[in-house]
Image (tube, rainbow, N blue to C red):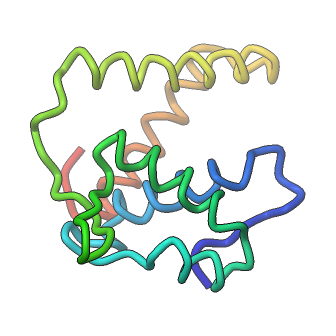
Amino acid sequence: MWPRIDPRSDLPIYQQIIQQIKEAVAKGLIAPGEKLPSVRELAGRIAINPNTIAKAYQELEREGIIETIRGRGTFAAALSSGVGDEMKQRSIEGLMEKILVEAHYLQLGEEELLAMLHSMAREWYEKKGESP
């Protein structure tokens, strides 16, 4: 059943939903324009408070991952080049900062971390049928 919620995770439930929807869109499991379950439907399906689902959907909509059309539902947004380069860079830099902090505490060296990133990126793009 999608999404899979881990109640023991340190990550709040709404963030687990956000992460899983983003991943599904990125991997092509949810196609642009594909209809997502309504807040109530998804809440019932995974036994989560509808307000939690609504919070996740609001954040995804703010980020341009999904769009809600009044009277029709919620859909995966079409990938657009409308996101500015500066915004993309800030977003990725924030995530990279978190990775660097974790790598520091796990005592991973720069070369090891870069090798891991390169390997994962290559695998990711190969699965999507794209050249890195």
Q: Does residue 13 appear to the left or right of 21 in the view shown?
A: right
- Quadrant position of residue 30: bottom left
For the C terminus, give its image quadrant. top left
Farthest-out residue, front = 71
Along the line of sight, the residue nearer the viewer: 58 or 2 = 58
Q: Estimate the x, y position of residue 110 in percent, counting from the top left.
A: 59, 14
Query: Residue sitting at 79 percent across and 17 percent down?
Result: 107
Query: Residue sitting at 29 percent across and 61 percent down?
Result: 68
Farthest-out residue, left = 81
For the N terminus, give its image quadrant. bottom right
> Eyeballing the image, is 40 above or below 59?
below
Q: Estimate the x, y position of residue 40 in percent, counting from the top left.
A: 55, 77
- Quadrant position of residue 6: bottom right
Q: Does residue 61 appear to the left or right of 129 in the view shown?
A: right
Q: Estimate the x, y position of residue 71 in percent, counting from the top left.
A: 25, 75
Q: Does residue 3 appear to the left or right of 10 in the view shown?
A: left
Query: Residue sitting at 71 percent across and 67 percent down?
Result: 49
Along the line of sight, the residue nearer the viewer: 94 or 60 = 60
Q: Does residue 69 appear to the left or right of 65 in the view shown?
A: left
Q: How many marks?
A: 0
Query: Residue sitting at 44 percent across and 79 percent down?
Result: 37
> Eyeballing the image, is 43 above or below 20?
below
Q: Estimate the x, y position of residue 77 in percent, counting from the top left.
A: 23, 58
Along the line of sight, the residue nearer the viewer: 95 or 113 = 95
Farthest-out residue, right = 8
